[in-house]
Image (cartoon, grey):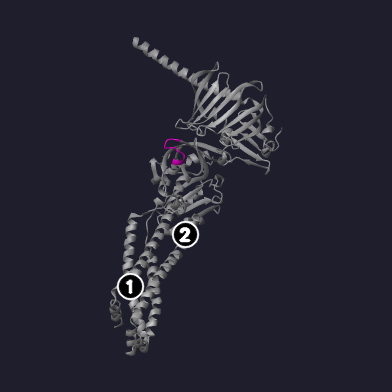
Amino acid sequence: MKKGIVVIAGFSVLLLLMVGGDGYAQDAQTIVADSFNYWRGEASIATVTMRIHRADWERSYTIKAWTKGEKESLFTILSPPKDEGNGTLKRGSEMWMYNPKIDRVIKVPPSMMSQSWMGSDFSNNDLAKSDSLLYDYTHTLTGTEVDEGTMVYLITSIPKPDAPVVWGMQKLKIREDLIFLREEFYDEDQKLVKALDFYDIQILGGRRYPRVMKMQKTEAPDEYTLVEYDDLTFEETLSDDLFTLSALKTPRR
Amino acid sequence: MHLQLAWRNIWRNPRRTTIITIAVVVGVWSMLVVGALDRGMIDQMVRNAIATLTGDIQIHHDGYRSDPVIENSIADPKDVHNALARHLPEGSFWTARVRVNAIVSNARYSTGVTLVGIDPESEARVSFIKTAVVDGHYLASDDTTGILVGRALVDKFETKVGHKLVLMSQDTEREIASRAFRITGTFRAELEATERQFVFVNKAAAQEMLKAGNGISEVSLFLPDHETVDMVRDKLKASLPPAYEVETWRELLPIITAYLSIMDSWIFIWYLVVFIAMGFGIVNTMLMAVFERIREFGLLTALGMKPWWIIKGVLLEAFFLLIMGMAVGNAFGFASVFILNRTGIDLSALGAGAEYVGLPRVIYPTVYIQDVITANVVVFVLGLLITIYPAAKASRFTPVEALAHI
């Protein structure tokens, strides 16, 4: 009899652990998805300044960006004048680039996907597969910490076995109000390759939002790319016409 | 009588005879060895190229060779299978592959490669890949996530067996296709460029990734008898619809074919160059020998020897010298080639330099009987021809000149 109770107790603990563990994972899944959606919004229009910093030079672009849902984005460069009108359209996992000087739209071929976007520390893949975080990873909540009085979730994201991602692991820091603080990219030996940090949280476009993003590779400490939001508004939705090849050639200002 | 006279004459001055024989020996030896080296090198290049992925014959869909994309694949390989079943000689092997350009990347690196989707079983009988695996193991037929990569690529990517690589390419709908693979093994190839260029996955995995259905890019054949290549090619060509291209390795590897076709002339030119160096030695020594014996030739003329007989005598002396030199030279040549063929000549110390010109890592010199014949004919015929000059000199000494000579 006693033995029976012990067995039942053991089982229920196991069950609890399984349910609890599962619930935990489910939690992490929702946290990531919610934060991602909070960050992207339904649709948004933004003006950002991208500063590419290198050891002996720095260059900055002003870019106007439209996004819709998880998969559609359009970027066009406002300044410097030399690069004005250069655009990038992203739809699903496909990308197109437009160069006004030669008046040509090129579809970014697979061979260029891992190259850097506009010379920054972001690769074309970072843009084209930005939603890969939602679909290609299993997220686990590994702990919490307190940062300036708010709770921060620490999440470890392991790519699903067949997912076509190059990373071995990602580690995320997400504030409890769903604001990304840091995204770390690890290789398969669990060594940090690059990290994306989010700073300067303030009210932007009517919601609390990190105004500055900084992408930095671990191996090059004096090289980084800063993206600062100058202006951001969230919309209910944007017209589908905006995310077409003709809109890429003549973006609305 | 002439023969005996000539033979005794050349041994009147053994040192000179030895020197001239050595010149011929060195000449013949270098002709044989360098010729064998060149032949060995080109043979090795051909064999490497055929074993790497070419095979004796390949079948493609029209257009694939000029634009190797998945759209130009053989959508339904049934025709090809039928033709192969009917026309292949016994003992031949064939394999079908998917072959497109792709990008391979991991967390830190990415580079362009040729993605080869293979059928592990039949591939093993046609190309080098199964025997080339040095680390990990060969692809299993049901392993759809495994990938074989070259050692040079693994080193460059700082990765190892068991780690993940992501392949990206364009699929049949012109969309970007990407898929994750795990390294099951690394292979070593004769050329480092091969190790960097090719990655191997299962054919089914490649077809799925590229949405190619049953489509294949090429069929590669291995024939038991390489001489029948053209015949088999013609038969296959006749039995396949015109939308297929059937080509032998000679057509698939134009650079090597060009090498092969200039090889004969190149070797002949080399023989001439060596002979010219050697020829001056022969003429010089023979002239010396003739001028030393002015009194003797004058006396012979005075005794009534016809000029033609004197020419014949000198030529016979040259004949003996050449024959001796050639015999020893050939013996040395064959011996050195035999030894080098056993050990091979290791060029890996040259590293990237040899790589750059496409040289194999180890050269095994090979003697072609036609080269031996050419070398000996060149030495013998030209050797006798140039000896006509000292011989003619000898025949023109008059008794009066001979008397005036001290």
Chain containing the residue with disc 2: B
Q: Nearer the viewer, residue B312 or B201?
A: B312
User: Any mark on residue A151, and which?
Assistant: none
Q: Position of residue B255 (x, y in %)?
A: 49, 57
Range of magenta residues: B155-163
- The answer to whether B288 appears left or right of B229 in the picture is left
User: From the viewer's perspective, is residue B355 above or below residue B396?
Assistant: above
Please check the rendered image and state whether residue B162 is part of the magenta-colored stretch, yes or no.
Answer: yes
Residue A150 image point, x, y percent:
55, 16
Parent chain of label 1 = B
Instruction: Report x, y in % for residue B109.
Output: 50, 38
Where is the C terminus of chain A found, in terms of image quarters?
Answer: top right
Q: Position of residue B55 (x, y in %)?
A: 45, 52
Which residue is situated farthest in the front direction here? B406
Element type where label 2 sits in the image: helix
Quadrant of the snapshot with the N terminus of chain A: top left
Instruction: Name the residue at 52% across, 25% down.
Output: A172
Please name the residue that numbered disc 2 is placed on: B259
Measure the C-alpha gap from mark 2 to mark 1: 33 Å
Whether residue B142 is visible to the viewer of this picture, yes or no, is no
- Does the rendering let one see residue B352? yes
> Is residue B397 positioned above or below B350 on the image?
below
Give neighbour class at mark 1: few <14, some 14-19, many 20+ (Cα, 10 Å): some
What residue is at 54 percent from the left and 22 percent from the top?
A: A174
Write the residue at 41% across / 67% down.
Answer: B274
The residue to which callout 1 is attached is B323
Which residue type carries mark 1?
Answer: Ile
Q: Main secondary structure of the magenta part?
A: loop
At x 56%, y 47%, the residue is B72
Residue type at mark 2?
Tyr
| Of pointers 2 and 1, the one earlier in the residue sequence | 2
Q: Is residue B81 above or below residue B162?
A: below
